[in-house]
Image (cartoon, helix red, strand yellow):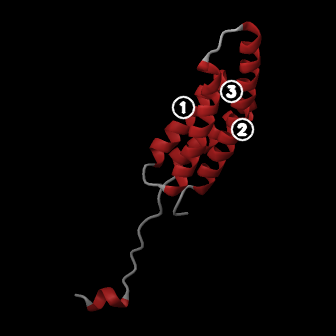
Amino acid sequence: MARPVAAGVLTMLGGLFILVGGAVIAVIGSILSAFFGSFSSLWLIGLLLGGLTILDGFLMVALPTPHSVWGVLAIVFAIGSIPFALGGFFVGFILAVLGGVLALRWRPPPPDRTITVEARTLR
């Protein structure tokens, strides 16, 4: 494949689960802050991590050249989502880590070495 599509799709699915987990934690956090009076923006970090993981998965497919950077970021976002979004109910964590590992293991296809007729006539 010319692009790490499987890695990107798994990372985006993991990011979706992380986003939902972050939304659940944010709702619980806002309810608790309404009752106890102290509001902390730490509840919103799960939403941010979910969105960044989805963006990371999209960038894996759109820009495959720095695939190792996207893979490392997917793993870092997945690990960071554990305390703030419960890792997307741990399903998102597993999917994002698998996507990150696949992005790290992906290799671009070798260049095509066939000589076309047009290339022979240019010499």
Q: Position of residue 113 (x, y in %)?
A: 39, 75
Q: Residue at x 59, y 50 (%)?
A: 8
> Is tag 1's residue or tag 3's residue first in the polypeptide sequence?
1
Q: Nearer the viewer, mark 2 or mark 1?
A: 2
> Is tag 2's residue or tag 1's residue first in the polypeptide sequence?
2
Which residue carries the number 2 mark? 17
What amino acid type is highlighted by mark number 3? Ala
Secondary element at image label 3: helix
Residue 115 sits in quarter: bottom left
Q: Return the residue nearer the eye: 6 or 107.
A: 6
Q: How crowded is the residue under tag 3: few (<14 C-alpha within 10 Å), some, or many (20+)?
A: many
Q: CA distance from mark 2 to mark 1?
A: 16 Å
Report if residue 90 is visible in the image: no
- Relative to 27, does residue 70 appear above or below in the rendering? below
What amino acid type is highlighted by mark number 1? Val
Q: Nearer the viewer, mark 1 or mark 3?
A: 3
What amino acid type is highlighted by mark number 2? Phe
Report if residue 62 is visible in the image: yes
Residue 85 image label: 3
Residue 76 image label: 1
Quadrant of the image containing the C terminus: bottom left
